[in-house]
Amino acid sequence: MILRDRSGMALLLTLLAVSFLVAVTVQLASTVNWQMQAAHNLRDSVRLKAMVRSGLNLARAALAADQRRNKFDSLDDEWNRLDPATLSSLFGRGKLSVRVIDQSGLLQVNALVSQEKDGIKRRQQEKHQFDLWIRLLTSGRFAIESEDEAVVLVDSIKDWIDKDDEVRDHGAESAYYQGLDPPYSARNGPVEYPEELLLVRGMTRKLFYGDKEHAGLAEYLTIAGRDGKININTAPLAILRALAPGITKEAAGELVDFRRQKRNLDLLARPDWYRQVRDFPDDIVLDRNIVTVVSHCFLVAVTATGDDGMVRTGSGVIRRDDRRRQTLLYWEVE
């Protein structure tokens, strides 16, 4: 009887030991698998981050090559034709997409307040920008109901940017914002990121982002650049319409069609190429103070995708000057 009890106890202890070893083995295997997966993820993350950085360098190379080849910028340039399939083939594994978006075809927010020291020239430049903004805002594309609302918004943006606390006729300075909940102050300096405009009097989320019935103003604005000049070779149709009074949607469409045609490419080197457009009104003259055919600021958006679906992205702005020097204004990887 005693031997039988001891045998049963031994069997029980053996089963417990085996169960313990199995549990340890399973836990160890799970830990090893987790560590291996973590190592693979880290490896893939590092690889994708390197691909993103390579995408930025490819964009910079394309911009440099384009500047060496010609003295004007258009949507036919190499920087606007970076093929994802060709880029991805450089890496063997994964996919790489690089988009270079000209910011010089957009409205420069910070150009609303001129840096010109001469008083007369400063007022002229600011008047050009003011009129440009009002024409765009009242074009019917955006969630803004009247010219009065547009004037309030533009004056308020100017007050947000300028260094003083003097309120424009329809604007707002820190005294206005201090009365809100929560209170805050006007920046009194250049806008640093587009979403900052949501803090400005008159700017609503519906106006900024758009909705089913309206376009978003954000896609037509840039915080890069302050000279206020718009590249008519790359500007979207809505901005082309705003360049002068009387430009209809159809007339702006003629400009877009003209610059798309390969046979007209060389003509795009001159800011007055629009005069060659057959159906563009002869009585409309674009102000040389606000148009150009040269671009200086470019948004670069890079997406690297691994074979397992992992994604890393990078975005930033490159400024390119007339002496072929490039400056990376900012760069962020996610």
Image (tube, helix red, strand yellow):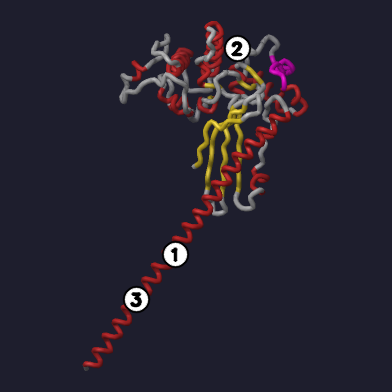
Residue named by callout 3: 19
Between 311 and 21, the one lying in front of the other is: 21
Image: magenta residue range? 269-280
Crowding at dot 3, Cα within 10 Å, few <14 / some 14-19 / many 20+, comes out as few
Please say if the residues under marks 1 and 3 sit with CB atoms less than 8 Å apart. Answer: no
Place of residue 232 in the rendered image (x, y in percent of width and height, measured from the top left): 65, 21
Quadrant of the snapshot with the N terminus: bottom left
Identify the secondary structure beneath mark 2.
loop
Mark 2 lies on residue: 245
Q: Which label belongs to residue 141? A: none
Q: Residue at x 68, y 45 (%)?
A: 86
Q: CA distance from mark 2 to mark 1?
A: 70 Å
Q: Residues within 10 Å of mark 2 (few under 14, many from 20)?
A: few
* Residue 271, magenta (yes or no): yes
Picture coordinates of residue 321 (x, y %)? 62, 25
From the viewer's perspective, is 314 left or right of 34?
right
Q: Which residue is mark 1?
A: 32
Does residue 56 appear in this view? yes
Q: Residue at x 64, y 26 (%)?
A: 234
- Is-magenta flag for residue 98? no
Dot 1 amino acid type: Val
On screen, 114 above or below 330? above
